């Protein structure tokens, strides 16, 4: 009987301690821990942003500060490949525009902890690319404060381009954060225009007594053809996107001059198209000359059959 009361007293003591702990512990302990974790993440992101407008992230940082909850801030991530061995010139150009946008936000009066700019390089976070099934760069994605990214949270770079102003408009649509883009002064275009005007003006001044070349139809026709060849071969696309001249496979060393995708091209590919267009045009000119000229019949026949042999 004494043993029974001893066990009962011990059990009552344990229950008393348990209830006392329940009473003494503050309610919402898990919520407080969540708030502390969120505060630490925000403070860390603000500290990194104070050093650099674009925070560089590897796989661990991306999963902790971008993917994992809790999070009450939006994150813009540029997935890129900036290492020289990747030969991604468009990545470097997109990075320059991205830096302009991030700096505009960092040094604006509206800057807050509701939006952060980050970058994940392939050579520093290949596991992130694999996790997101991403096989192209550069790519811009928005990770909202709540929920998972939707289709519209991936920037349509192929259709819109990567200018800072277009990125700012896309961010405003996704986050309601308005960013006014401030670009550093660039006088290269003004200097180039001034040099061109000076060159043309100097040429006209030197030839002021003989300006008949201005009315030369053949010269203007050749200049027009050069512009047409350049535009139809994709030179403007090369200027905007900055693709490599060709691609060398690092495994077998094979050089490719034609891009495998219909959404891109190499510089060499545009040169090949330009030469083909020029050859076709020259063939049409020879056919026309052979049919309309009054020269030797043998030469006219030769001029007519040469383009046909080329086709």
Image: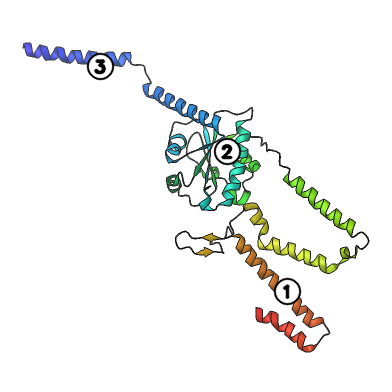
Q: Please state, as top left, top right, bottom left or bottom right, where the N terminus lies in the image.
A: top left
Which label was assigned to residue 18?
Answer: 3
Q: Nearer the observer, disc 3 or disc 1?
A: 1
Q: Position of residue 143 (x, y in %)?
A: 51, 38
Q: Secondary structure at mark 1?
A: helix
Outermost residue on the right side: it is 209
Sequence order check, earlier mark of 3 and 2: 3
Dot 1, crowdedness within 10 Å: few (<14), some or many (≥20)? Answer: few
Which label was assigned to residue 174?
Answer: 2
Which colour assignment does the render follow? rainbow
Dot 2, crowdedness within 10 Å: few (<14), some or many (≥20)? Answer: some
What is the spatial separation of the Cα atoms under label 3 and label 2, in whole angstroms? 49 Å
Report whether 70 appears left or right of 13. right
Report whether 238 appears left or right of 194. left
Outermost residue on the left side: it is 1
Dot 3, crowdedness within 10 Å: few (<14), some or many (≥20)? Answer: few
Q: Residue sitting at 48 percent across and 29 percent down?
A: 44
Rendered image quadrant of residue 285: bottom right
Which label was assigned to residue 282?
Answer: 1
Q: Secondary structure at mark 2?
A: helix
Q: Residue sitting at 63 percent across and 48 percent down?
A: 160
Residue 10 position (above or below residue 208)? above
Viewer can see residue 217? yes
Rendered image quadrant of residue 38: top left
Q: Nearer the observer, disc 1 or disc 2?
A: 1
Sequence order check, earlier mark of 3 and 1: 3
């Amino acid at each position: 009987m004494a043993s029974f009361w001893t066990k009962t007293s011990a059990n009552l003591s344990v229950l008393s301690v348990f209830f006392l702990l329940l009473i003494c512990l503050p309610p919402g302990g898990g919520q407080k821990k969540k708030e502390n974790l969120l505060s630490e993440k925000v403070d860390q992101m603000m500290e990194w942003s104070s050093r650099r407008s674009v925070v560089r992230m590897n796989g661990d940082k991306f999963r902790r500060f971008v993917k994992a909850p809790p999070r009450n801030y939006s994150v813009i991530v540029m997935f890129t490949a900036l290492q020289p061995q990747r030969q991604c010139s468009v990545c470097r150009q997109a990075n320059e525009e991205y830096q302009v946008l991030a700096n505009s936000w960092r040094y604006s009066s509206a800057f807050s902890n509701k939006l952060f700019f980050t970058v994940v390089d392939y050579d520093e976070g290949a596991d992130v690319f694999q996790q997101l099934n991403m096989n192209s760069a550069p790519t811009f994605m928005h990770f909202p404060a709540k929920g998972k990214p939707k289709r519209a949270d991936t920037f349509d770079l192929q259709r819109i381009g990567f200018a800072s102003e277009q990125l700012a408009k896309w961010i405003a649509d996704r986050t309601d954060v308005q960013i006014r883009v401030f670009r550093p002064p660039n006088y290269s275009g003004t200097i180039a225009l001034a040099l061109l005007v000076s060159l043309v003006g100097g040429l006209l001044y030197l030839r002021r007594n003989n300006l008949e070349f201005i009315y030369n139809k053949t010269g203007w026709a050749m200049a027009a053809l050069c512009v047409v060849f350049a535009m139809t071969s994709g030179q403007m696309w090369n200027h905007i996107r900055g693709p490599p001249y060709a691609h060398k496979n690092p495994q077998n060393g094979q050089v490719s001059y034609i891009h495998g995708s219909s959404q891109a091209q190499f510089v060499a590919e545009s040169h090949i198209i330009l030469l083909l267009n020029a050859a076709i045009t020259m063939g049409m000119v020879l056919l026309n000359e052979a049919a309309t000229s009054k020269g030797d019949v043998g030469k006219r026949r030769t001029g007519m059959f040469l383009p046909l042999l080329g086709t």
